Amino acid sequence: MWWQRKAEQSYGIPDDQLTEWRSWSLPSLRKAFNEDKRTNPRFADWWEENSKEAYNTGLAGASAAFDNYVKSKSGKRKGPKMGIPRFKSKRKARLTCRFTTGTIRIEPDGRHVTLPRIGTIRLHENRTDLRALIDAGNMRILSATVRLDRGRWFVAFQVEQRHELGRVSRPDAAVGIDLGIKTLAVLADSDGVVSEEPNPRHLDRAQKQLRRASRVVSRVQGPDRRTGQGPSRRWEKANRARNEIHHRVANLREDTLHKMTTRLASQYGTIVVEDLNVAGMGRNWSLARHVADAAFGEIRRQLTYKTGRRGTRLVVADPWFPSSKTCSRCGVVKAKLPLSVRVFECDNCGLVLDRDANAGHNLVALAARTTGTGVAGDLDPARAESKPRGADRKTRTTRPRRKAGTGRAGGTIPSPRAGTETGDRQQATRAQLAPW
């Protein structure tokens, strides 16, 4: 129907006479598929062999894709622009299916789950803790999603759970977290204590094994998309061995991040983090792998829901907050501080401190100036601080021989980019626009 309307428009047919749109809502797509599956020869022979949830998962994805595209095109959806919906390739897409109806439960032994059309299957892990929450009436299963990830099958339950606020050992204390690559996190609390979380670099440690496993995979006959040739058994075996290495690295990274974020959320009443542009940092070819291995976005995601479970506060600093350039003692902001300079030296008061520790002190001081909402940029009025001009930027000069023409009272009209002539003015403008 999409291409039919485009063809009719090329013929000169007016818009009010084009083929009417079919609704892309999930109920309407499901109704149309139910009417078509019994008469269309493409489905008539085999649609009953599968669960209805397999088709419903694809229809839900199509409905969400069209809805996101239309909202993005009209400006109602934030974020990057969404393109025209496309079919997913079976080779690239993650195999997944979501069950919303039927028998979905965890068996009393905690080692088995029962799913519609699949039946009872054994789990690799023991989840008697989830079964105890269900028996106590504190959890209710809403749906189950089965997916194939890194050669292993997983089942994820969407649940409705009653949470009780956990206790925090230091509810009146605050901590500022400065994330990095050399050191995963530098922690500076409100008592002035600075500690470090080392970066385990799980992916870097596994590079030797990954290179060796990748050479084995490349030496055997794999799938060929051009000729349609399938992979050999030796290729599948070698690919599984390589996937196990990636799976182990992902598990080690997840375990490290969960231990760190759980300890911080259960210890401090206020946590301050930076709003990092992780996607932009990943475009740096020399740092992309290290940024992905550190998983800055995952740290913030875990802190967000773990602080909410304990009723504590998470303050997200503005992206343009100069945590590394600001002196933690006198508040003077340096004009330039390259990433290669690892020691902060204040030209005003003479403070010499590690740049990450200095950033942590500035972040924890930011918690005292927030109103309690934890929203980025929601700060109380602070005293004016000296901010030097952006010495690394060239200011625009007026041509001496240019004269004002008619209709230009007072000289030339300033360029729309005049607000970005100095680093201070650019920083102030971004700080005002950040909350919106």
Image: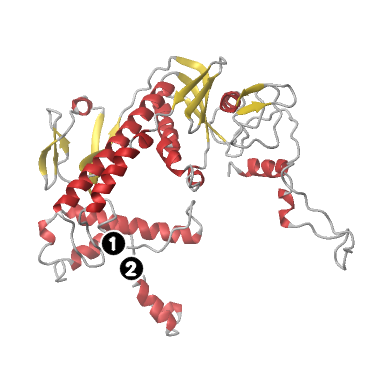
Which three-letter amino acid code belongs to the residue tagged 2?
A: Arg
Q: CA distance from mark 1 to mark 2?
A: 8 Å
Residue 18 percent across, percent down from the top left: 39, 78
- Considering the image in quadrants, where does the N terminus appear? bottom left
Residue 297 percent across, percent down from the top left: 44, 38
Residue 212 versus residue 137 in the image, above or below: below
Residue located at (42% from left, 17% from top): 168
Is residue 332 found left or right of 198 in the rendered image?
Answer: right
Residue 332 versus residue 236 in the image, above or below: above
Mark 2 crowdedness (10 Å alpha carbons): few <14, some 14-19, many ≥20: few
Residue located at (61% from left, 39% from top): 320
Residue 352 versus residue 219 in the image, above or below: above
Considering the numbered disc 2 on the image, is that residue within a helix, a strand or a loop?
loop
Residue at far bottom of view: 11
| Residue 350 visible | yes
Which three-letter amino acid code belongs to the residue tagged 1?
A: Ser
C-beta proximity under 8 Å, tags 1 and 2: yes
Considering the numbered disc 1 on the image, is that residue within a helix, a strand or a loop?
helix
Q: Which mark is residue 22?
A: 2
Q: Which mark is residue 28?
A: 1
User: Reading the chain from its start, which is encountered first: label 1 or label 2?
Assistant: 2
